[in-house]
Image (tube, rainbow, N blue to C red):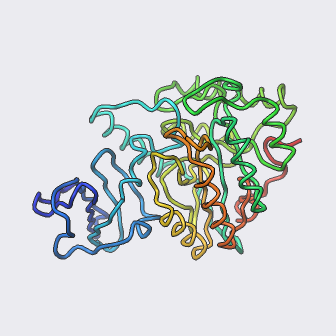
Amino acid sequence: MERLGARDQPSPQWLLGAVSQSGMGRRGVHFPVGVGGRAPRGIEPVHRSQLVGLEVVGGGCDLALQLHRGRLLWCQHAVGLVSHQPDRGSTGMGAQAVSFGDRLQAKWHRQLARHLDRDLRPLTGSMPVISFTFDDAPQSAFERGGDIVRAEGGSATYFCSLGLLGAQTEVGRMASLQHLQRAIHQGHELGCHTYDHLDGWRTAQETFMHSIEKNALAFKTLLGVEPPLHFAYPKSGARWPLKRAVSRRFVTCRGGAESLNAKVADLHLLKACFLDQRAGWPLDDLRALIDLNRRQCGWLIFATHDVDPKPTAFGCTPQRLKEVVQHAAQSGALLCTMTQACQAMNLIDVTGAGGRN
């Protein structure tokens, strides 16, 4: 990876990127935070929304974009694209500071997970689809989040760690059985998030898979419903070969990547965009992402944790969620659960739905 010279580096509020492509493949270029307030000569200024859909790797103050056609980019407020680093999967509670070496290793494992054991399916739906998902899931997501989605005629998916029921956590008080039962009655869907909210990067595969099975059993014994069909990775996301093992258990598995699923989707690691406070997405950019999903007739998955007037770093305010949901509805997208989205996109013939009688 190359580094641009100090004289070419923009101000701390701006990030700079480049990539070249040859017959031997693509070569990424790091771009660090620097000095100066204007785009260097010869570099194309772009809006942050234009970066949506591009593969993003890296972490901290550095970001590497793998682009096509070797364009040089200069973009304001791109920090939100990497704010979840080094945690690029279903980020959540328990994020820890890591060393530079750990980040390099994490980048390598993310690339392996992203490109190995894929189940690529064409998206052939007749209309764009948007799914709103809530991870863990705290009471506020059930008491506020689901109702906001329902107000626009949609249904949400809650990725639950049933071992956390009723517990006080970093994202607030966790939901009770009554919250889950009410969600099912209202037409929402329940997904799996492991029983113990485990980090796949720091947990033995056998332990991780056991927690998934334990969660499935809890859905049956506590709620009297079939195990969920869909999974979202807690904390650090997917790691190969864990991705291979988990994908055999579910119809879809959701990660992060701060992007939408367009043209094709990897059902073993679906892309999602987090609405969390730490993501730092301006509302205009979220609207631009929704509009891009409409034009590409794609599947956009939003994710967050708590929904509160004073949210944690892992959640968002009811007002922000309402604004995003309303624009999603105005875009003409189908606002639906993960199972409904699979059906609408002709991805797979799904009979029944996780978390439903």
Q: Is residue 64 left or right of residue 258?
A: left
Does the rendering let one see residue 238? no
Q: Position of residue 213 (x, y in %)?
A: 70, 28
**Residue at x-position 78% and y-position 62%:** 153
Q: 356 or 21: nearer the eye?
A: 356
Q: Is residue 157 left or right of residue 197?
A: right
Does the rendering let one see residue 246? yes
Q: Quadrant of the C terminus?
A: top right
Using the image, determine if residue 6 lies above or below residue 245. below
Q: Position of residue 303 (x, y in %)?
A: 59, 49
Q: 168 or 15: nearer the eye?
A: 168
**Residue at x-position 31% and y-position 53%:** 63
Q: Is residue 288 left or right of residue 353?
A: left
Q: Quadrant of residue 209?
A: top right
Residue with the most extreme front position: 309
Using the image, determine if residue 20 lies above or below residue 350. below
Q: Quadrant of residue 192?
A: top right
**Residue at x-position 65% and y-position 57%:** 322
**Residue at x-position 78% and y-position 48%:** 188
